[in-house]
Amino acid sequence: MAATRVLAAVARAEEPPGEDDVRAALRLDALLADRAGTDAEERWSAERRLGAVFVQAAFYRPAGLVATHVDERLTTLLAVAAAIEPGQAGVQYRLAAVLARRGERGRALEHLERAIEAGWRDRARLEADPSFAALHGERRYAEALRRLGE
């Protein structure tokens, strides 16, 4: 199945596929392995394909879902984007916010920590973001704020 159809199904299907099904349909693990491989043509091809999937999963497909807080679908799309570009701080932050809203505290904190490691520096936004309200009492959340400074 073409990547566009797979990602469209996440955004629109009555019963959207889960994260594992999307990763399998996109052949994500194989593409990531090809991108890290030694064959130059395979690396280039995988990088191009992963780039196209990343843009769709990180920006275009979630755009219509953010306003409606369709968090299960957002989680799947942003998890795919984060797997492709784990160093993209904005994607990690957005995924952390969605996971926090869903009550997945451990995963939310993990992705918040990854966002900070990747360069997220907006402490004021984090403190004001209602998505993270349930995490305010967590030690790891306080540590994240400390890492962001005053």
Image (cartoon, helix red, strand yellow):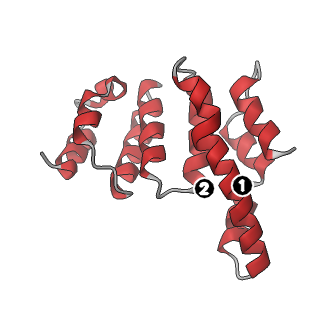
Closest to the observer, 132 or 118: 118
**Kind of element beneath mark 2:** helix
Q: Position of residue 23 (x, y in %)?
A: 71, 47
Could you tell me the amino acid type at mark 1? Leu
Q: Is residue 99 above or below residue 37?
A: above
Q: Is residue 11 above or below residue 51?
A: above
In this picture, residue 84 sits left or right of residue 128: right
Q: For the residue carrying disc 1, how many other residues have a C-alpha within 10 Å: few (<14), some (14-19), or many (20+)?
A: many
Per the rendering, the mark at residue 28 is 1
Could you tell me the amino acid type at mark 2? Ile
For the residues labelled 2 and 1, say whether their Cβ atoms are less than 8 Å apart.
yes
> Which quadrant is the N terminus positioned in?
top right
Q: For the residue carrying disc 2, how many other residues have a C-alpha within 10 Å: few (<14), some (14-19), or many (20+)?
A: many
Quadrant of residue 103 in the image? top left
Q: Which residue is mark 2?
A: 84
Residue 104 visible? The answer is no
Q: Is residue 44 above or below residue 15?
A: below
Q: Position of residue 107 (x, y in %)?
A: 45, 40
Who comes first in sequence, dot 2 or dot 1? 1
What residue is shown at x 77% (from left), y 54% (from top)?
27
What residue is shown at x 81% (from left), y 37% (from top)?
5
